[in-house]
Image: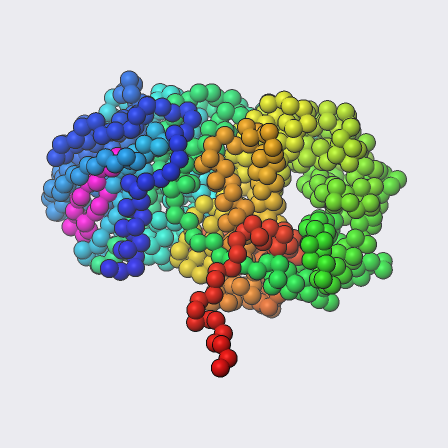
Amino acid sequence: MSHHLAVALLLLSAAGSPVAGGPAPGGGGIVALRSHDARTFAIDAGDYEVVYGPDKDRKLGAGISIRPKGRPEAELFTRMAHGPSFNVTDYGTHVGYEHAKPKKDFDIFRRLECAETPDAVRATIRASRTWADFTSTVTAYKGTPGLIRWTVLAHAKQDKAVNEPPIPDCELRRGGRWSDHEVARHMVQRGPASGIVYFRDVPMQSDILYFEDFTSLSRLYELTGSANPWLGTTDGEQRGAVRMGPAVSEFQPAEVDGKQSPPAPYREKIERHSTFGYLRPETFRIPKGQTLIVADTYVYLRPTVGDDNVAVCRAFVEMLAPIYRRIPKPPTVYTDWAGEVVPRLVRDILRPENSHITDGKWYPRAYVRYEHKDIQLWNIAQLLMPLIEYCRKYPAQREAADLKAKLEATLLRFYDEKWGGFANNPAPMPDLYYTGVYLLNPVYLVSDIAVAGNADAKRMVLGYRKKLLDLGRNCRYVFADVSTRDLTSQKVLYQFDTTCMYIYVMMRIRQLNGGDDPEALAAAEAAAERLSERRMDLTWEINQTAIGVLACQWLYEATGNERYKDLAWVPLANTLRWAWLWQGNYGIGKRLVTFWGFSGTPANPHSCEYESHQVRRFVKEYLQTARLPGEAATGPRRSDVRSMLEDCWRRGPTQTRFALPPTIVQAGAAQYMAAPNGSETDCGAVAYDQMVPLEDFHGGWGTDLEWYQGNPKLGQVGQEIYGAGGPIWYALWQSELGAPPAPSPRAKARPKR
């Protein structure tokens, strides 16, 4: 049995394998095989039924219908893999089905097998076309009523060139015929994030989450040689391979025609759509004898229980979690962050080419071998915060202590006592516009340093208190580019997730004031209310979104108000929306790990280490906070959700491991990195021997062929010192991330004779 066939059969067999876990909230009813014969089946799937039988629109056509019980007029219909070369559910063909020799694929259907186990109901359709045999499986999970999975495995009997317009693999129907449905789209895949469509179907009265598992499709993408499950368009928008209409950008302008434009709360828009789902590459060749998965799809349907923003975001997280539990995941690779990576990282940051002296102070550059001095506070603060704890834990690490001391000596350089605050650049504060990112991103980092005991950081944050309170009131807790002159006039685009950072900082200020600061608490509460205005449109930078999960939890603990605990679902859903829950086992992915990366900004074609490690940090702390004694009900409500979030920070560092140039070289993937002379980078040069992580980590092929897809070689942006805090955090978590594998007997030293 070939490796690819073995992997494919393993993935398919998982469709009916036992999976632990209780039923998810929101759905109900039994999951059982209701009926079947030689050519049809009907499955009860909680509030829905899954039916296979003849298609009313075609004599010999057939497909899978998923519809709410009691409302059969509206349904979701699929042939599992749509297109003239596939349509594996059909019984046969008819004139015009194939352009040439219309009867060559007559009698496609071979047989139907149905089985019920204690954990699932599974129906397998065997079909054959001239070019391939197909094994297609539909599974309904008893532990999660409403969750349906279908997979299509193809074995090529002859060489096959697939050259046909891609067709989405789901249709929406009424009365058994193709028809538009009124839908409210909550999110559609953009860029390399997971292949998800999430929407409310009005006639079906259901929330529907569609998930295409790109990991299972790796062999398909390996055969294409260039395509990825996301594509760039002429306007630069990173579209996904899973679609429902055009991709949507959620940004709002802060000014229109030169006048201030207040931020508008999210308004649900009812649209009409008739198709959605996965689109295979348009052109690829399948050699004879190849076995590959051409579809691996999850569709989770639940009766709609609410259309307010918090309910929609909570449903997304709760529906994604049981799907996540079932998808394949790459192994977590042990890394000696504390003993190997961080000591080398510290030495590399201290290299002369990676730092500079300005006004007698030492500063790290933003990128390895960067030609600009580029003094930035968040470059310093994101290193200093974990270094404080690292040096306490490993006091013998002299070079780490030296780096920490150098960073501490620079902090007050950024504080403008006359103005009463600081931003990302050195004082004095210039009279100009700053983005919310450049104002509040460094503030939350410095507030962490203050809580860790640094007196200068505490002075900076508490000195900024009045300015921050004024900033919140003047901007009504929604921030765009703001003038430091008056803190009122805003322009360019609103950065909605900056509100999350504001809540976090206010709660830190309250903590620094001994837990007694009514004004800071009131400001945090006012800002939290603005989160209720957002749905899946919160993100500007992913770390700013994730910080809101923890900030809402803190606000709940401070007030006892359950509303703030529930508001955490909004930033949590918006964080997971941009997660890369796929492993591309082709091109770069054959040697490196993409799983649990994050798009640093919406639809960003690469994962960014600064944003990713901050996300993992906040998720980890949220889970630990939510498990305080006597607070068992304060965190996620489902074991599936908790398990998914645990994986976010436990598995995530493996993706970072493969963003380190020495590890990339060791993995035999140096050909995927930008050239070391700086000719292929935007900032500085990539040094193959330095442990500083790459800013931009791509999935796919990493070849010049894909520059048009926004997918160049690893490190095209540069090697970011301002994101190097991640490995230091992971060193602090090392005992929780797992121990190294036990040495094999052969590796043991022989006893002396």
Above or below residue 485? Residue 293 is below
- On the question of residue 704 being in view, the answer is no
At a point 17% along the width and 47% down the height, the residue shown is: 129
Furthest-front residue in view?
753
Furthest-bottom residue in view?
753
How has the structure been colored for display?
rainbow
At a point 44% along the width and 43% down the height, the residue shown is: 194
Is 712 or 367 nearer to us in this picture? Answer: 367
Q: Position of residue 649 (x, y in %)?
A: 54, 46
Furthest-top residue in view?
70
Furthest-right residue in view?
418
Q: In which quarter of the image is residue 441?
A: top right
Is 289 or 662 nearer to us in this picture? Answer: 662
Above or below residue 580? Residue 684 is below
Q: Is the magenta stretch mostly helix, strand or loop?
A: strand
Q: Quadrant of residue 614?
A: top right
Q: Position of residue 422 (x, y in %)?
A: 79, 42
Q: In this view, does 408 lie to the left or right of 632?
A: right
Q: Position of residue 70 (x, y in %)?
A: 28, 17
At a point 59% along the width and 58% down the height, the residue shown is: 337
Residue 526 in magenta stretch: no
Above or below residue 49? Residue 108 is below
At a point 81% along the width and 37% down the height, the residue shown is: 462
Q: In this view, does 521 lie to the left or right of 195?
A: right
- On the question of residue 337 being in view, the answer is yes
Q: What stretch is highlighted in magenta?
A: 121-136
Q: Position of residue 412 (x, y in %)?
A: 83, 48
Give the total number of marks visible in the rendering: 0
Q: In which quarter of the image is residue 556?
A: top right
Name the image quarter holding the N terminus: bottom left
Q: In this view, does 570 lie to the left or right of 118?
A: right
